[in-house]
Image: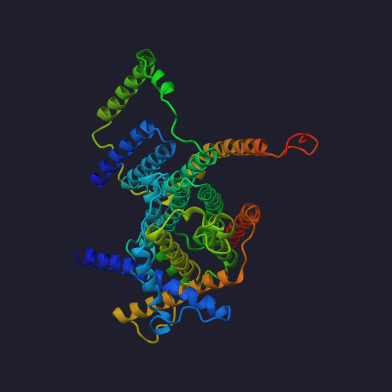
Amino acid sequence: MNETLGTLLIIAFVILGVLHVAPGLIWLERRLLALWQDRYGPNRVGPFGLFQVLADAIKMFFKEDWIPPFADKATFILAPCIINVTALTAFAVIPFAPGWSVVDMSVGLLFFLAMSSLGVYSVTLAGWASNNKYSLLGGLRASAQMLGYEVFMGLSLMGVVLMSGTFNLAKIVEAQQNTIWYCVPQFLGMMLFLIAGIAETHRLPFDLPEAEAELIAGFHSEYSSMKFGMFFIGEYIGITLISCLMTVLYFGGWDGPTFGISEGLALKLVQFGWFAAKTFVFLCLFILLRASFCRPRYDQLIAFGWKIMLPLSLANLLITGAALLALE
Amino acid sequence: MTIAFYVASAVALFATLMVVTRRNPVHAVLYLMVSLLAVAVVFFTLGAHFAAALEVIIYAGAIIVLFVFMIMLLNIGPPPSTRQESLLLTPGIWVGPSALSVLLAGLFLYVILAGGRSVQAGSYVDAKTVGISMFEIYFLGVELASMILLAGLVGAYHLGKRDLPDEAEGGNG
């Protein structure tokens, strides 16, 4: 009974937490981008412009929710739901602190990969259901890009699995506590995963599916009101998810100095604090990437994935395996 | 877990039935995806967590996406008429497959009734066990399968190869 209650608490915490982090990120992104581009950004509404997000949310809810008559209605409505459901479900396996995860799954890492590969449907179906040439092109681009980058995303993670000997995310963190954060021995794997993560969330510089200069807004051209908002929020949930995984897989998760606190809730909170702080750094990195890179051409993007990243991730797997065998 | 098993099986059967009866190809493919997800749940309830995860990653998450991709690329809508399908509904065509299916169903029933009541395995299979059995017991099968896949890859490369410059004259390359 107590255990069930604890799990329910964590679920509520995850859903509420993540759904609040996402709009917060929109504000953070606009302020940080402005900072790096020597502007102010939104700073009028409320303290530091924080209520701007609230104003935007109200605006979005009260816009007309328009479904084009030529669209495939059921699929059109289904598409924005998928991205949110898969991204939020993937949070179930993230260990925020020792014992603080919704499920302690033995194939946790594979569960994340499964959810992220199902996320492709959202963008693809949105592009198809809109029945609009630009959306269709955006959907096609998205499915080719996400399929290609998913392949080496999985392969790049296998280095971590080899070193820790498990797919369980909590055990991967514990393995790092006992040895060394995997960002050092798995540096190549980490870079590959980060690049794959950006492409999976189709963020700049890999936002070809919605390239507004060529495709208007790509797969979500026809979406309005909160259906568009769902895509928007889903993208930020995806970024948060990838940042959490970077922390868990390569930067020791909740590992960090505990300031002499050794037990109880206080220890858990300190450990969660470390987790949140590390995740925050990666969230800022995502925003910095948007501020500093330009978009590649589409064929360059696909060739880069298949011809450079895939062989590199295979090499990483080979070298890690060989080194582990040699050290045994 | 037993309830989850039966619910997932029912969903898989229903979704598969919907796959063959939908006229819109994208809807059919989406039902196929649901069917594969339900099969993954069946695997999970039987203790094969690793197989369940791979089922979702590879089948539902990659292969069906390629199906959707191709349907989008070729822009296939619902067929204008079902004349071709209605030809398949003449009774004569059904005799052979029905006889074979009845034979299979009889065999299946015999195996269940003779081999004991429990059809569920229930024991937990982890990734390590799967890896060991794949690369020790079924090593030859795995290697053969990988060679068939390689043949497919080479064939796809050959079909997708661009024409040589001197052959491409008259076309746009």
Residue at point 37%, 68% (across, down): A59
Compared with residue A57, is residue A125 higher up or lower down, i.e. above or below? Answer: above
Residue B119: x and y in percent read: 28, 37
Compared with residue A98, is residue A163 higher up or lower down, i.e. above or below? Answer: above
Is residue B22 visible to us here?
Answer: yes
Which quadrant holds the C terminus of chain A?
bottom right
Q: Quadrant of residue B115?
A: top left
Residue B35: x and y in percent read: 36, 40
Q: Nearer the viewer, residue B115 or A288?
A: A288
Residue A248: x and y in percent read: 45, 68
Residue farthest along the right direction in this orientation: B166
Residue at point 36%, 73% (across, down): A54
Question: How many numbered discs?
Answer: 0
Compared with residue A117, is residue A277 higher up or lower down, i.e. above or below? Answer: below
Residue farthest along the left direction in this orientation: A1
Compared with residue B154, is residue B92 higher up or lower down, i.e. above or below? Answer: above
Residue A93: x and y in percent read: 38, 61
Residue A307 in the figure: left or right of residue A189: right
Residue B61 in the figure: left or right of residue A105: right
Q: Quadrant of residue A293?
A: bottom right
Query: In the rendered view, how is the structure colored?
Result: rainbow
Is residue A253 visible to us here?
Answer: no
Residue farthest along the top direction in this orientation: B92
Q: Nearer the viewer, residue A5 or A168?
A: A5
Q: Quadrant of residue B5?
A: top left
Which quadrant holds the N terminus of chain A?
bottom left
